Every structure is written in structure tokens, then in C-alpha cells.
Image (cartoon, helix red, strand yellow):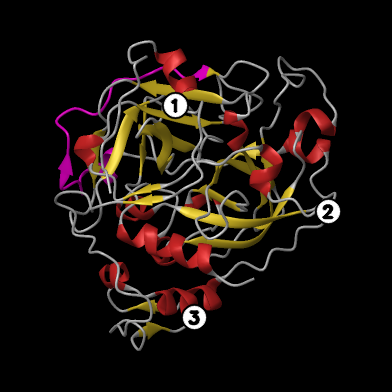
Amino acid sequence: MSNTVRRSPLRGRAVLASAAVLAALSLTATACGPENGSTDAGPAPAGAATATTAAAKPGLGLPTSLADLANWSLDDWAKFANDNILKNDVVKGFWDTAKMEAAAGRDTPEFTTQSATAQNETDPQLPNPIPAKPQAHPYSAATAVLGKLFLEDGKGGGGYCSATVVSDPANPGRSNLVYTASHCLHEGKGGTFFKKMTFVPSFNKSGAYSNGKKAGEAELAPYGWWAADEAYVSPQWAAEGGHDGGPVSQYDFGMIHVHNMNGDGKSLEETVGSSVPVWFNAPREQIGSAFAYGYPSAAPFDGRELEHCDSTIKPAKLSFDAARPTMYAIGCTMTPGSSGGGWFVTKDGKPALISVNSIGPKPAAWMAGPSLQAQAKNMFDYVSKRKR
């Protein structure tokens, strides 16, 4: 299996490069060797016995040592999922135009000076700001994989994050999987999953909702509403998650399985026309230009536009805990609402997702996302292969 990444020939022309990286989408997810220096061990064979199963914490289904999660089998993931799976209560028609307009972008866990004192590994200088730029309307078939994930918090308030349609190896060409951040799905330590989670791909595709204009449901949700019938977060987020960025951010990845509320039998991938594979265990030295996407809502943005930050240099490193996979960091001025949005690189001439928007400072200057190593792949494999 090749690990070669071909950098875009448009490198240096950032706007064109970001479009190119999403221009041709593959339907096959790829797993390669682990990141050099990572302590996140490779996956155990499916069905293999592990020491984690019998040492679970009541109510969470977590092992005594969270570091053991890299060795969970699919059976271990099944046990955790059965104890922690979302029971979504979304009702068709709940997210009407008024509710979508009122939904505020979910805040991004904040990187602070206090949290930075725990760093064990970081590049000498974090990235310089890269201004976010709006995607041109109408959005192409390639960018249809990006969208808004609407949610209702525990207090009944509406909000949203950003998310990406990803390829499903168990259902090629018919994926119903969406990748985002754990903090977009679950409150974290002591909390629960958010409610009424619904994915709207290619939100405001035509631009009819831009510049303060009013628009109908067909313009806001050109591919309809996709209810999350299952949601999955990293066990670390369920046990440790909170408002401040820190060690738990190194596992801030999550995913949902959705269904079509229109009932026409088509999958999400068939409806939007594409998906993007997740590149797990991507060797850091092979990652060049990275492009982060999202729907930021805090000033100077208004939540109506799909924005992107185009980094033409290798992502910097950021780590709070050396025992966990090191995060990526790129310059980016996107604000709350962009959380969970996908990061893309070119792999073998095609785009691949390597991370999601997770944490950043205030005011916005850069963004960091988790490196998707063995544990992320184990969770993905379980969700993909799960019988429904």
C-alpha cells in the first residue's frame, strides 16, 4: 500500500489549491502505518481478548487506563457503544428556516495560556494567522460533502457545528457517515449527547441566503435534512471533555450515522454525489498543504458562508500529553461554528480528510485538530461494520 502524498501542483495559489483538493473525490478509505513517534498502538485483531473489557467504569464502559483504548477490539467498541450510544429524538420538520437562522455556532474549546503550561511537545512557534476566505457560490459537487450539523443543547437552545460526509468502506458509494468533533456531539465530562442532531449538507449552496438575505428551506438545505440516528464520541471526551482545550482535545473526533428523513431510499453519499475518505495514521512527514473548512458564525463572519483556511506549509505540532497522538495546527481565523469542519490534504492525487477543527485561541489566529491514529480508526471500523 502506497503512503505517497502528491502535493497539489497549484501550491502557492491558495484559493485555487483549496478547490483542487476537493475536485476529485475517492470512495475508498485507506489505512496506513502509524505516525512516527506516536504511542497510539496499532489495533488488536477483531474479536481478540483484551484486558480492558473486564475493567470498566460503571456507567461509561471505560477501561481503567484510557491509554489501553488503542488496543480495543471491535467487541470492546460494541460494549462501549451500547452503553453510550445516542438515542436521537429528532422529529422531521423540527429544523425549519426560523430555527436554523436562530442557531448559533457552537463555541470552540479555547486554547489558553493556562492550558499551554501542560505542553510536552509543540513547534517553537505556532502558525501565523491565515485569513479565512468564503467558498464561491454555487458550491460544487465536491464541496457538497461539507455542511452544518444542527443540534439542541441540554437547555433547549439551538446551535450548530460543521461536518463532512466521509466514505464508508462497508458501503461503497452509499455512505451515511458524517465526521465531526466530539465536542459537537456530547457535552463532555458529566454530560450527555446533544439532541435533535441533524446534518444539512451544502448549506446555502446557491448563495441565496448570503449578505443578510432571506431564503427558503430549499436554498438553506438543498439536499434535505439528515437525522443522526447514531452518534459516537471518543471515550476520552466522554470522560474528560470540557470547555477548555487540553489533553482531551488530542482525541476530539466524533462521527454520526444518519438517515434520510425524506424516505426516498437514497444514501447521503448518493444524494450529494460524493464523499471523502479518512486517512488514518497519516505519516506526518507526508502531509504538506492542508485546507480547513467550516461555517464560522462569530464576527467577522455570520454563519451563512462556507469558509476555508488554506495552509501551504506543513502543519505545526501541538501536544498537551506526549502519550497521546500529537495534534496538527495551521493558521486560521475561523471562529465558533467552524468546529468539526474537515481538514483536507491531497493523497495519491485525491483529497483525504486528516483532521477536524478542534481548538484555537481567542482572538482567532490558528486552529488545531486531532491526528487520527489507531483509536480513531478502530472507532471508525466499528461504526462502518455495525449491523443496522
Tell me the quarter of the image containing the C terminus.
Answer: bottom right
Between the residue at mark 1 and the residue at mark 3, the CA separation in whole angstroms equals: 42 Å
Residue at point 54% right, 24% down?
307
Three-letter amino acid code at the position of disc 3: Gly
Which of 190/228 is in front?
228
- The answer to whether residue 115 is magenta is yes
Which of 103/13 is in front?
13
Q: Earlier in the sequence, mark 1 or mark 2?
A: 1
Residue placed under numbered mark 1 in the picture: 21
Coordinates of residue 253 in the picture (x, y in percent): 43, 52
Q: Nearer the viewer, mark 3 or mark 2?
A: 2
In the image, 71: left or right of 376? left
- The answer to whether residue 103 is magenta is no
Q: Quadrant of residue 285?
A: top left
Badge 1: residue crowd in 10 Å (few <14, some 14–19, many ≥20): many
Which of 210/275 is in front?
275
Between the residue at mark 1 and the residue at mark 2, the CA separation in whole angstroms equals: 34 Å
Three-letter amino acid code at the position of disc 1: Val
Vertically, is 198 above or below 304? below
Residue numbers of the magenta segment = 113-133
Residue that protrudes farthest toward the front in the picture: 1
Residue placed under numbered mark 2 in the picture: 92
Mark identifier at residue 59? 3
